[in-house]
Amino acid sequence: MADSGSEDIAVIGNTDLTPSESENNIKNAKKPMIEKGTSLLKRMEISVAEAEKRTGKNTVNMQETYTVYLIETRPVDAALEGTNPVPDSLWRRYSEFELLRNYLLVTYPFVVVPPLPEKRAEFVWHKLSADNMDPDFVERRRVGLENFLLRVASHPVLSYDKILYSFLTEENGWKENVFETGFQAKADSRLKALNATFRVKNPDKRFADMKHYGDDLQSVISQLLRVRARAADRLYGVYKVHGNYGRVFSEWSAIEKEMGDGLQSAGHHMDAYAASVDDILEEEEHYADQLKEYLFYADSLRAVCKKHELTQYELEMTAQDLTSKKQQREELATGTVRTFSLKGMTSKLFGQETTEQREAKLKMLETQIEEGEELVKERNAECEEFVKSAWVDVEMFKEQKDRDLREALISYAIMQISMCKKGIQVWNNAKECFSKM
Amino acid sequence: MSTGTSKPLASSGQKSLQDICHPLSAEESALSLHTSSTGEKDLSLPNGTPVDTSSPASSSSLLNRLQLDDDLDGETRDLFVTVDDPKKHVSTMETYITYRVCSKTTRTEFDLPEFSVRRRYQDFDWLRNKLEESQPTHLIPPLPEKFVMKGVVDRFSEEFVETRRKALDKFLKRVADHPVLSFNEHFNAFLSAKDLNKRLGLALLTKMGESVKYVTGGYKLRGRPIEFAAMADYLDVFTQKLGTIDRIAQRIIKEQSEYLVELREYGPVYSSWASFEEDLHDSLEGVAGCVSNCSSALEELTEDMSEDFLPVLREYVLYIESMKNVLKKRDQVQAEYVTKLEAVVFREDKKTPVPTDVERCQDRVECFNADLKADWDRWQNNKHQDFRQLLTGMADKNIQYYEKCLAAWESLIPLLQDKQEAKGETN
């Protein structure tokens, strides 16, 4: 495990977690957000250090401008030794991150895969640019991409993935590697399955509840972000209009003798007050980003629940198929027609089959039933496997979510406190000027 | 604390005409510490100005104000007037509000040291007109606006009546503090007469002769002394700036109100989120509570600005209008004098007009100028104090708003952090 690029890193994460191992994972996950457990992050420092604009020809041979992000990696040991070598680095664009994530989604359907920062700016308020090229947007995206990589690289399952490692270290060979896995074929069927509607008879209640939770979370965070954007617009207006006081006090002070100085200085404080809202709202944007992450996480959560439904459904279908085959066998063997069937009707009309035909049919059914039972056993095992490993990940996700969101609320409260203190200070300054008028 | 919706004033109800105490009859009651409707004691300064003791800063400013009053103009105050206790009167003909006007004085012109009457807005308007007529060389303080658009403003809502009461109180105090106006016989009547209407006719007859005849039409402004021209210029610019400040304040109130609308939605979203969370439930509810507290604080700020800040600005605009009128009158008096003087110069050969006529005009001009200058200085002084108080008050209200919000968020932090630590420990 200490070697980098070791060949015995499994592509599919270890699904057979013993109780003690899963307990260990949960313990590790409960420490501060990005845990350097036995994961990639322990061995390697990862950061998305910079962003740059590039122009080039795209797939349809047209000029386009896009942004690339610099991923820097450095073995942890080197930093500890104090030699501080230059980190390895490569450039990636957003679409490559998307590709990586799609691969992870398909390959680890039981994992709540961390989300990417939003593709397009949503929930904007008027001052915030909806332009993907806007430097503030690019900066926030850089932070989001780094966050994504850190979360993936510290995940007890995902972090061992070879393709992930290749993404981080091989600038050029990576795309071939990922396409070689053939994940795209699975991607299409996955997409179809996720969007299909089907009725499961016996879903695991925990997953059904989780799916509802995911729906609720998505709905409430969307609402929150919408209200926040409108409130930000209004708050911006309140602060900026105060700037007009600055100008009028200055003009007024020109015709006053004793009051002039006080008015003038108070006016400057009003200007400062108006200007302060830009920083305030920038900080609040960070809070909005934290909420957005969990908005998108809700999607991942729902995908896992949906996958469970799918495996459960397939199991139920297979079992149902087996039951009907067994029934057919019984009917054939005893000669009784339990259920109405075309065969039954035609045999009545055209006479019974010969004994040979019946024997042949029975034999076929027997083989089918045997295969069927094997299939049911397989599907059952798959289902159980999925439920076990998925639930571990879901529990881990829940812990992480509670921690992260509480941290976000704390920093939001701290932000509000700082805003109030600034307000008190400015108005106290203005008050002093007024009282000295 | 008002919740933003207008509350109708308690009415005296429909009683038979005999039972209704005549609103203009004098009530004799001792002036003492009076309680407001909330049951809290309203502390008043000796001259009747109510003191706001809600903010910690006010106790020291209270001291300052007491000391300042003692020194003002070197005069000792001997007449204190207050306007309070608004009451609604419902009769078959009309509904209106009366206010109690309490006076406390050592002046011998009055029969009693303390007395009060009830007056309605009409009576204040009458007083102001009489003062303008009888003291044309002086600046008469303004009254709050007479007309209110019915349907737009509720004339009987608590907020409107209170705003008006404050303005009427300020009006009488300014008159009472004026060394000339306070001795005016109409003012005396207003404060003490049982029945104002009787005096109305008499007053009209005796004062008619003294009213200044105005020269109608254009008059030449040349020869207007620089200081009065400067006053006029100052007033023009000042009006403009006040107008701008009024517009800015209104805009801020509007933006704050719209911000409040969003905040009011914000809290409930956190609550509904809390409803389907387990560990996060308390934290989210805490945030919802905080936002709700901030909303209330903002609502108070917006109301205060509407009720206390804007009316004072508007009052000063009216004050400036009065001042401009007085300046115009002065110009006219001077023009009259100049015309008469020129007539004397050009008609030396003909029957000369009585020189005393010209002399009288000259006296009038000089008196007017002197009175106006004195009043101007007084007005500037008052303006200085009033605006210092107004703007400091505005700053105070904003500080209080932020302090309330700060307290709310600071109390939330320990709740959030405890939860975080508790989670860490149980593992």
Image (cartoon, coloured by chain):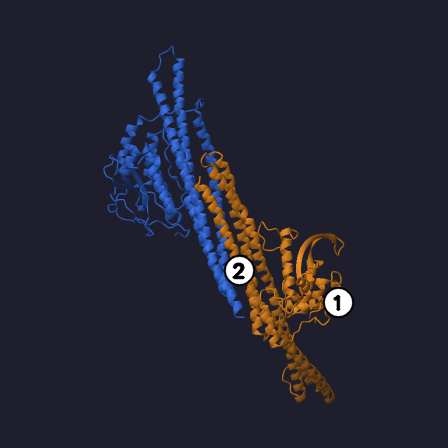
Mark 1: secondary structure: helix
Q: Position of residue B183 (x, y in %)?
A: 29, 33
Task: Give the SS element for disc 2.
Answer: helix
Instruction: State which tag comes first along the sequence, 1 or 2.
Output: 1
The chain coloured blue carries which letter? B
- Counting from the top left corner in percent of width and height, residue B133 is at 34, 30
Residue B292 is left or right of residue A33, and the answer is left
Q: Quadrant of residue B111?
A: top left
Q: Residues within 10 Å of mark 2 (few under 14, many from 20)?
A: many
Q: Is residue A219 above or below residue B42?
A: below
Is residue B151 something one can see in this rendering? Answer: no
Query: In the displayed structure, does residue A404 sit left or right of residue B213?
Result: right
Image height check: is B126 above or below A409?
above
Q: Amino acid at mark 2?
A: Leu
Residue B89 visible somewhere in the drawing? yes
Residue topped by disc 2: A409
Give me the chain letter of mark 1. Answer: A
Q: Amino acid at mark 1?
A: Glu
Q: Are marks 1 and 2 in contact (CB under 8 Å)?
A: no
Residue placed most toward the observer, A432 or B160: A432
User: Picture quarter containing residue B359?
Assistant: top left
Q: Position of residue A364 (x, y in %)?
A: 72, 84
**Nearer to the camera, B93 or A60:** A60
Residue A390 shows which numbered tag? none
Q: In this structure image, what is the colour of chain A?
A: orange
| Quadrant showing the C terminus of chain B | bottom right
Percent coordinates x, y for residue B32 in the rendering: 28, 46
- B125 relative position to A124: left or right: left
Task: Identify the residue under disc 1.
Answer: A180
Rendered residue at 60%/73% (across/down): A24
